[in-house]
Amino acid sequence: MSSNMNELQAVLPAASTRLAGKIALVSGGGSSGPGWSIGKASCAVLARHGATVCVLDNNLDAARDALATVQSLGARGLAVQADVADPDAMEQAVQAVMAEYGRIDVLQANAGIGKVGGPEDIALADWERIQKVNVDSLLIASRLILPIMSKQGGGAIVTVSSVAGLRYLGYPHLAYNVTKAAVIQFARMIAQQYAGQGIRANTVVPGLIDTPRVRTNVARMFSPDDFEAAKAARDRQVPIGRMGTPWEVANAVAFLASDEASYITGTELVVDGGLIGKYA
């Protein structure tokens, strides 16, 4: 076994069959840089629990990289390329999954972008693009996948928001915060409307998570020239004393996707080390 596989086995949960027979579509399933994004880690964890994992990403190489991890764990899967905000591309991607497997049991809507800036700083074009990727994409995916799940008798949708959708985190991130709040409400509405059709919809709300995007963009706002100092500043914000890992979020995704969460819908699972409970 390679050293990389040894490292992967060390962070993965124990293998199980809790998602055996389920076809999962993970949008934003690749990673924006070296390391593990929430999407890529979720692909691995879903595979670890027996799911067939279809990795969707705007970057086909990133999707293929995540799929290689899925396959290294002995699971089946598919890599598809699509911009989640493009209805035609998403329709083709969903058709590719259906042609290969004939059903979709789990949708993890993970794709999300942001740009720092308050109401006087954010360009309208950036605001609109963030809205399209973070929120409009949910409508696009839902219109394609809800009829499939309804016809097959059920399914689970797990959206990924952020504690930024619940509270101010100390810097202006208006478009991201507003759209991540909308993600939560979108899932709540889907849950209510489709509960009678066996479809559950819930949201995982990550806190400060150590991902490639955070390392490249967000954390450097604390110390632009010193990542370790930036990381330490982020760690100090969290009551537990550290940022979370993508694996800790992925485990929550897998639980909500599984039949173990069969009586859970229309709610949020916050994975934040106690952050939103802080007074200051």
Image (cartoon, rainbow, N blue to C red):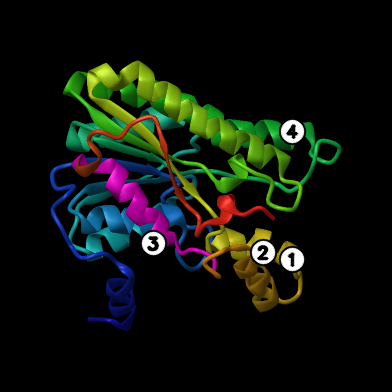
Picture residue at 64% right of the left edge, 74% below the top: 232
Residue shown at the point (57%, 47%) measured from the top left: 163
Q: Residues within 10 Å of mark 4 (few under 14, many from 20)?
A: few
Residue 135 in view in this figure: yes
Residue type, numbered disc 4: Ala
Q: Is residue 239 above or below residue 176?
A: below
Gap in angstroms between the C-alphas marked 4 and 1: 26 Å
- The disc at residue 247 is 3
Q: Secondary structure at mark 2?
A: helix
**Residues at marks 2 and 4, CA–CA distance in whole angstroms:** 24 Å
Whether residue 67 is visible, yes or no, is no
Q: Nearer the viewer, mark 2 or mark 4?
A: 2
Front one among 234 and 40: 234
SS of the residue at dot 4?
helix
Q: Position of residue 7 (x, y in %)?
A: 33, 77
Work out whether 47 lies above or below 73. above
Where is mark 1, residue-wise?
A: 222
Disc 1 residue type (three-letter): Phe
Looking at the image, tell me whether mark 4 or mark 3 is earlier in sequence order: 4
Check disc 3 and report its element: helix, strand or loop: helix
Q: Which residue is mark 2?
A: 219
The quarter of the picture where the C terminus appears is bottom right
Magenta stretch, main secondary structure, is helix
Residue nearest the viewer, comparing 185 with 45 = 185
Question: Magenta includes 95?
Answer: no
**Inter-mark Cα distance, 4 to 3:** 33 Å
Q: CA distance from mark 3 to mark 1?
A: 24 Å
For marks 2 and 4, the one nearer the N-term is 4
- Pointer 4 residue: 125
* Contact (Cβ within 8 Å) of mark 2 with mark 1: yes
